[in-house]
Every structure is written in C-alpha cells, then in structure tokens.
Amino acid sequence: MLAAAIVLAHLAAAAAALVALPAAAAAVVAAGIALSAFVQLRVALHRTPEAVTGLELSADGGVAVAGPADEWTAARLRSAAVPAPWLAVVTLRDGWGRRRTVVVLPDALDRDAFRRLRVWLRWAPVAGPAGTDSTHARARG
C-alpha cells in the first residue's frame, strides 16, 4: 500500500511538472522525480542495507532489529511515539551506531501484537543522551 502511494505521488508530481514547465525544465524535473521514486520505493520495499525487516522487543526494554539479510543486532530505543491508534514510530540506534526509524502500521502485525507494541512503546525506558537508560519508564504519546 505504501509503495502504491509513493508511485502515485511521484506520478502526480511528474505530471504537474510536465504540464507547468517548459520541455527542457520538465525533463530535468522528471528525471529528479524518477530518481526520488526509485530511492523511496527501495526504502518502502526494504531493499536498502538500513531497512528494518524485524523488530524484537523484550520485557526488560531490550530491542533487537533484523536487516534485509535476516541478520539480528542489538539496538537501543532512542525515542518512540504513538501519535494515533493506527501508527507507531520507533527510533533506534543499532550496534553499529546507525540511527534507524521504523514506522509500524497496523497491517504489519496482527491486531493483538500491534496493541502490545503500542503499550510497550508507551512504557519502555528510553536511552538517555549519554546512552544510559532512564531510571523509570515514562509515558509518551
């Protein structure tokens, strides 16, 4: 669904450029839009090395992430947001120091697993600025 939305948005942008700009400028803008579509589709379809294809959360606040090659690595929760009943956003710092942001929509998990994820994100301790966990869980959202 996300991939379809990305394609539609890029097609609309390209159509607008072709209608509104002179031919030479439209060609340059269309090339940029095509490149953007390619990059964003790779991200949406988990085809980049930074893609998160799995997320494992433990009761003690531990997090592990899987990449596209199914390699698991420990990570630290940096921030989490549950801005709506249909959305959860998780920002992690993996074992190599890379920041990874994961957007989880309800159709990615079964209903009960998505509910448990949202509860875990609301109450899990977040790593402090120096990488230390907070002393108590904080409600966020």
Image (tube, rainbow, N blue to C red):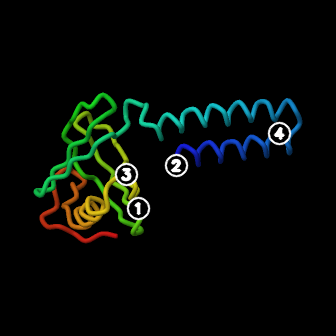
Disc 4 or 1, which lies upstream in sequence?
Answer: 4
Q: Is residue 74 left or right of residue 101?
A: left
Labelled disc at residue 18 = 4
Q: Are marks 2 and 4 in contact (CB under 8 Å)?
A: no
Mark closest to the chain's N terminus, 4 or 3: 4
Outermost residue, right direction?
22
The amino acid type of the residue labelled 1 equals: Leu
Neighbour class for label 2 at 10 Å: few (<14), some, many (≥20)? few
Amino acid type of the residue tagged 4 in the rendering: Leu
| Quarter where residue 86 is shown | bottom left
Q: Callout 1: helix, strand or loop? A: strand
Mark in front: 1 vs 2: 2
Q: How many marks?
A: 4
| Residue type, mark 3 in image | Ala
Q: Amino acid at mark 2?
A: Met
SS type, badge 3: helix
Please name the residue shown 66% across and 33% down the image.
Answer: 34
The residue identified by callout 1 is 87
Binning the other alpha carbons within 10 Å of mark 3 as few (below 14), some (14 to 19) or many (20 upward) gives few
Q: Where residue 134 is drawn, which disc sits there?
A: none
Q: Are marks 1 and 3 in contact (CB under 8 Å)?
A: no
- Residue labelled with disc 3: 108
Q: Nearer the viewer, residue 57 or 113?
A: 113
Distance from disc 4 to disc 1, alpha carbons, whole Å, reads 35 Å
Image point 22% across, 58% down: which residue?
126
| Quarter holding residue 115 | bottom left
Secondary structure under badge 4?
helix
Q: Which residue is mark 2?
A: 1
- The CA distance from mark 2 to mark 3 is 11 Å
Q: Earlier in the sequence, mark 1 or mark 2?
A: 2
Using a 10 Å C-alpha cutoff, classify the residue at mark 1 as few (fewer than 14 neighbours), some (14 to 19) or many (20 or more): some
Q: Earlier in the sequence, mark 2 or mark 3?
A: 2
